[in-house]
Amino acid sequence: MPKLKTHKGAAKRFKKTGTGKVMRSSSFLRHILTSKKTKRKRHLRGTSLVSDADTPKIKRMIPY
């Protein structure tokens, strides 16, 4: 059976934790930052978990 290929676009955006959960970074932090409040930008800085509905799709795209 052939190996599964990693979806390279998804591999750049998501990463798996040690327990198998999927982490993602926040959106809305790329441009037009002067009109956004400092508190909002600070809270968008970290990472968060992918929602339960989207996790199986992401795991298929990053199998390794």
Image: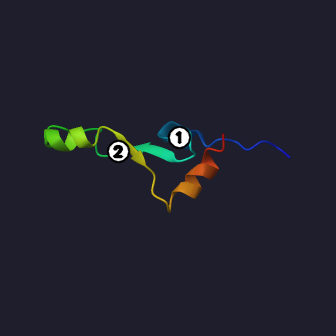
* Residue 51 percent across, percent down from the top left: 45, 57
Q: Is residue 28 left or right of residue 15?
A: left
Q: Is residue 52 left or right of residue 39?
A: right
Q: What residue do we see at 33% from left, 46% from top?
A: 27
Q: What residue do we see at 70% from left, 42% from top?
A: 5
Q: Nearer the viewer, mark 1 or mark 2?
A: 1
Q: How is the image coloured?
A: rainbow
At numbered mark 1, what does the secondary structure look like: helix, strand or loop?
loop
Q: What residue do we see at 65% from left, 41% from top?
A: 6
* Residue 2 percent across, percent down from the top left: 82, 44
* Residue 1 percent across, percent down from the top left: 86, 46
Q: Amino acid at mark 2?
A: Ser
* Residue extending furthest toward the bottom: 53
- Is residue 32 at all visible to an observer of this figure? no
Q: CA distance from mark 1 to mark 2?
A: 17 Å
Q: Label 1, on which residue?
A: 17
At numbered mark 2, what does the secondary structure look like: helix, strand or loop?
loop
User: What numbered label is drawn on residue 26?
Assistant: 2
Q: Quadrant of residue 3?
A: top right
Quadrant the C terminus occupies: top right
